[in-house]
Amino acid sequence: MAPSPTSQNKAALRDRIQALFDRSGLLLHLGATLGDVSDGRVHVHLPFSPSLTQHLGLFHAGATSALADSAGGFAAMTQAPDGYTVLSVEFKINLLAPAQGESLEAIGQVIRKGRTLTIVQVDVFALDAGRKTPIALMQQTIINIPDRKS
């Protein structure tokens, strides 16, 4: 049985986001991986490593923020017009709880897509022994810019 057009579109979208993810030097350096990808929604995972901690052994807020920024940007990228890419304009992050666990998961979700600006919310969770604890919440503004690397 042939795949449905929807599953073909979803696979193409994931391939496009994965290609961009693979060009993101910081994410590769941190050890992050791309999770689920759908229209307006992207998951990014970061396994624990001692190199990602602050003085108390928790995930550093910089690692948490970078993960959230990336998940939000890729979520916006799933809805960017053809021939465009995205860039963060601003974000605000609330750190809700200590970031400790086996890994972090950031889930970016487009809230409002505009012609020029897109508003994204990112929820970040710590995953540990089957528990999923909310540890950060980001609101982000993304701008669509012409893609010079197409």
Image (tube, rainbow, N blue to C red):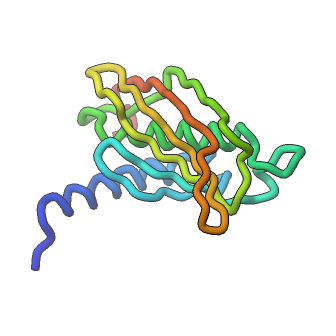
- Give the residue at x 51% y 52%: 44
Left or right? Give the position of 48 relative to 53.
Answer: left
Left or right? Give the position of 141 relative to 32.
Answer: left
Mark yes or no: residue 25 visible: no
Left or right? Give the position of 144 relative to 31.
Answer: left
- Give the residue at x 28% y 22%: 114
Residue 150: which quarter of the image? top left
Q: Residue 20 appears at what percent x and percent y? A: 44, 48
Which of these two is toward me, 127 or 52? 127
Residue 82: which quarter of the image? top left
Quadrant where the N terminus is found in the figure: bottom left
- Give the residue at x 68% y 43%: 63
- Give the residue at x 34% y 57%: 15
Q: Residue 93 appears at what percent x and percent y? A: 60, 29
Q: Residue 53 appears at what percent x and percent y? A: 80, 49
Which of these two is toward me, 99 or 32? 99
